[in-house]
Each structure stands twice: as C-alpha cells, then as structure tokens.
Image (spheres, grey):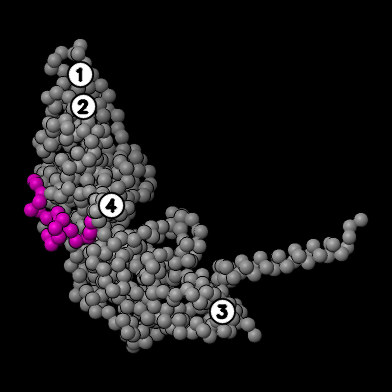
Amino acid sequence: MYNTSFIKKILLIATVVLFYSCDKDFNSIGGSLIGDDHFGLESEKYDVLAYNQEVTPVQSNGLTLNGLGIYDNSVFGTNTSNFVSQLTMVTDAPTIGEAPVIESVVLSVSYLYHVTEADPKGGNVYALDSIYGDPKGKIKLSVYESGVQMRSSYFDGGSQFAQLYYTNQDSGTDPINFDTSKIGARLNDDPDPAQNDAFFFSAAQRKDSTVVDANAAVKTYTYTYVAPEMRLNLNKAFFLDKILKAPASKLSSAAIFQEYFRGLYFKVEKSDGNPSNLALLDFAKSGNAKITIKYKAKTAITTDPDDTMEEKSLVINLSGAQASLYQDVKNPTYYNAVTNPNKTTGDDRLYLKGGQGSLAVVDLNGFGAKLDEIRTRNWLVNEANLVFSIDAEKMAGAYEPKRIYLYDLDNSLALLDYSLDGTTATANPPGKIIYSGIINIDPTSKRGTTYKIRLTNHIRNIIKNATVKNVKLGLVVTGDINTITFGQLKLKNDIFSNVPRASVMSPLGTILYGGTSSSNVPAGKKLQLEVYYTKPN
C-alpha cells in the first residue's frame, strides 16, 4: 500500500518546482510571453544621453563583404569604394608547357543574387542583391597590378602580428597606398566600354558554349548557364609575360608568387556623367573571384608531332590579404553633425553611417541615476527596450539599413541580450530576432519608422549586481548581425578605439531622433529607455 503522507510530500515538491520553473521562465524572457500589451505591468521611462561620433580611418582587411563602386547619397555624401587583393595560384609550380599561346584571360567575380523565376529558354532569371544607387548606374572600372606588396602578418621584436590595412589607404596620404603612381597599365583594356569605361553590374545569366567535337564536319555544342557575375577580359600580352613566361621559381610557392605578382587593384571613377552605383561582393569566398587563363602549348606526349598544341588552363584565385579602400566626400550638414557632437545634453539627430562613417554613443544616464531606488524597492524587470525613431523626412528616398546593432562600447563586446538570443538564422531576418534591431516598415509608405532593441537582460544584470558598470553603448548600422568582431581605428580617440566590422562593410546610413528635450525632436520621437516592472506591494 502506498504511504499517503509520502504521496503528499511528492505532490508538494512537484508543485513548488513547477511554480519555480514558471517564474524562472517568466523572468528570463518576460515580454516574449506577454507580448506588447504588458498587462498588469508598470512602465518607467528614463532619459538617454546620445550623441554622434565620426569614424575615422578604420581597419578594412579581412571583411566578408567588400564594396565596389560609387554610391551617391543626398543625406551623407558620396562613398567611393575601391578594392585590393593578393593573388594565389590554385596549383603551385604549374607545368606551363612549351611555346604557350594565350587564347583568353578572364577575371570573374560572382555577384550576390537570388532567383526570381526559371527562364523558359534555360537557366534562371536573377535579381542582384546588395546593389545601391541607380539600378542602371555605370562606373569607370580599372583593374591594375597592385603597386604594394600586401602581407597577412609582420614581425616586430621577434613577435608576429596581423598586418592591418585601413579604409583610407588609396588616398595618397599614407605610406602604404594604392594610388596610380604605384601601379602599371590598365589590365581590363578590352575595346568594349562595358568592360571598363561604362561598366555596369548586370543581372543577366551567362550562357557558355563548348564544342562537342572540334573535328566534326558540323560542330555541335553543349551549353552551361552561369549565374550573374563580373566577367572582364584582361590583357593577354601582360599575362603571357607575367605568368606563362615567368621564371619557374617565381611560381614555385604562394609566398614567392605574391611577392612577384603583388595582386590586383580595382579602382572606380565616375563614368562620363552617368549615374553610378555600388555593389557588395564576396571576394573572399573560395572560387568566387578568380582569373582563368586559357592557352595552348606544345603537347608533352612524345608520340605526337613536335608542332602539336594542346588546350591548357591555369587558374589564379583572388585570395590572401584583401582590403576595402574608401574615398568619402561627406555632405556638409552630416560632417558638421558627426564632428561637433553635443556630449553634454546630446544631439537631436543621430547619424549612423557604415564604412568610414559614424556611430552614436548611447549613455543610459537617466536609468543610472535611479539605480539605488530600483534596488531598494526590489522592482523586478520584465522587459526593457530602446526604440529609435527614424527621421523619415530627412531619409526620404534614401536606402535604409535593414538593421542596426547596439553593443558595449566601453569593452567592445556584444550585450548580454545578444549573446543569450538563440534564435537561429532564417532567410529574413538572419537570426537574433528577440534582440532585434530590425527595421519596422510602415505598410503604406513602405518606409522605415523605428528600430527596437531589447535590453532586458542587460538592465537586469546592472540592477542585480552593483559591481556591474552602467557602460556606454555604441550604436551602428550592420551589414551582418552575426558578425560581431571589431576593426581597429587607425588613430584612437578618447571614447573608442575600434568599430564593429559588420558596420565597416555597409555603405548605408540612417538618421534617428536623439534623447534630447529639444523642440527639434517631435513629440513621441524622443529616445528613451522604457522598462516594464513588477513592483511588489
């Protein structure tokens, strides 16, 4: 027979555990359970001190995406994005063959794209992603052999350090720069202006043909459809001398080859008054960017006649050290805002701009002043958020970043809410949905209205532990919410010495209302920290 007293004890323990678990879950995710109604909770709003800061030249090597092109923005100015990359032979010490004759040298770089539909004639119809500016924009594109030997690391005092390259290194003002005085002749010198002087990013797929039997009386072909990519014809005479006729020792290893052939420099300029645009490209992904040399050389088969030529190819990848190189001309209003911030009472507009742009410093000073009261009264935090309102009038017609990123500026770290957000990547958005920072779009105007960032765990941690500092926060645009590493500033300032690398990748910007009480901030748009509490009686 079961002991009744024992059963009662078990039921009591189970009930306590159940209530504890529910309470623990409620306090850990708060608003995720109660939605936006916050029924039965009490809200407190706190003033926020926020002001602008210019991002001076910043580390730009090793980015996962690199801009190429010119983006004209009436709000922020003109961003010119050049690019430089080392080269790596796919096969070291290749056997070139005797008397080589080049048939073609093609530089190909895959674009970012998505399929819109199947093409009834074969292949697919594509749309390009991450293209900013006029959809039909053209740029003058020049590809040169780089005049600078790039390195991934260097030694100093017997220690090895990563070699850093910065956004301003083609300005001609840096000892390591890529201006035209250090480069050779233009390599993409094809007579077709679409290959150089009037280049454009085309969404059209490529249709490559291959002869089935070259000796057949009637030639037949097989076709291969290739997704949209940059495809430039490069100077054959240059590559014949530089590669196919190079001393074998120069092609013997990656290190020797990269000293011999110092990489490619992509330089962009305006194209005869045409509107321009800028694309983000993944140069670093294996196989995405390469040079393919197709040529003929005397056959190595001893039974063939001496003059028999065979088809051969050689592939050189754009890999190794790479860097984005920016030349920005800032709009005067924007430049004045980010170089003359009001650190005492805050700025009424916060200018966030990627690349060598700007960020906002966010100080939760109003909340910090009330910490002792909150702790004494044992208020329990259910949810805490910062909601940033967009200045829609100033941003009218401009591209808007899909996401912003708030982080611990003092320590260059992700916030606790970011780290604890286990929501995984989907097609849109790519993860961190609870932490958010995702733009909210008005269904009528199709324009952005706000960005909301969850700070619940960050605020709880400050209240719970008196030794935890109420740190300054940094706010930037982000090109990839899953990239939270930092790039070093070339010259440190008195507030921060690095910037999230995902911000350096993005060419976009936005204007948000600050936390001041200025009449220039419309009612209901002021930046404040809102915290929902359970307040014990």
Q: Nearer the viewer, residue 173 or 535?
A: 173
Crowding near the residue tagged with mark 2, few <14, some 14–19, many ≥20 C-alpha atoms within 10 Å? few
Q: Is residue 461 visible?
A: yes
Tell me which amino acid carries mark 1: Ala
441 lies left or right of 57: right
Label 1 close to label 2 by CB (< 8 Å): yes
Q: Which residue is mark 1?
A: 300
Which of the two discs, 3 and 1, labels the residue nearer the N terminus?
Answer: 1
> Furthest residue to the right?
1
Quadrant of the image containing the N terminus: bottom right
Crowding near the residue tagged with mark 3, few <14, some 14–19, many ≥20 C-alpha atoms within 10 Å? many
Which of the two discs, 1 and 2, labels the residue nearer the N terminus?
Answer: 2
Spatial separation of the CA atoms under disc 3 and disc 1: 81 Å
Q: Is residue 324 visible?
A: no
Q: Which residue is mark 2?
A: 95
Tell me which amino acid carries mark 4: Ser
Q: Which residue is mark 3?
A: 533
Q: Residue at x 51, y 84 (%)?
A: 372
Asked if residue 179 is among those painted magenta in the image, a careful observer would answer yes
Q: Secondary structure at mark 3?
A: strand
Checking the image for residue 514, the label placed there is none
**Above or below 211: residue 319:** below
> Magenta region: which residues?
165-185
Which of the two discs, 2 and 4, labels the residue nearer the N terminus?
Answer: 2
- The chief SS type of the magenta part is loop
Residue 436 is situated, as x and y percent measured from the top left of the image, at: 45, 65
Q: Residue at x 79, y 64 (%)?
A: 11
Question: Which of label 4 and label 3 is nearer to you?
Answer: 4
18 lies left or right of 299: right
Q: Which residue is mark 4?
A: 159
Q: Secondary structure at mark 4?
A: strand
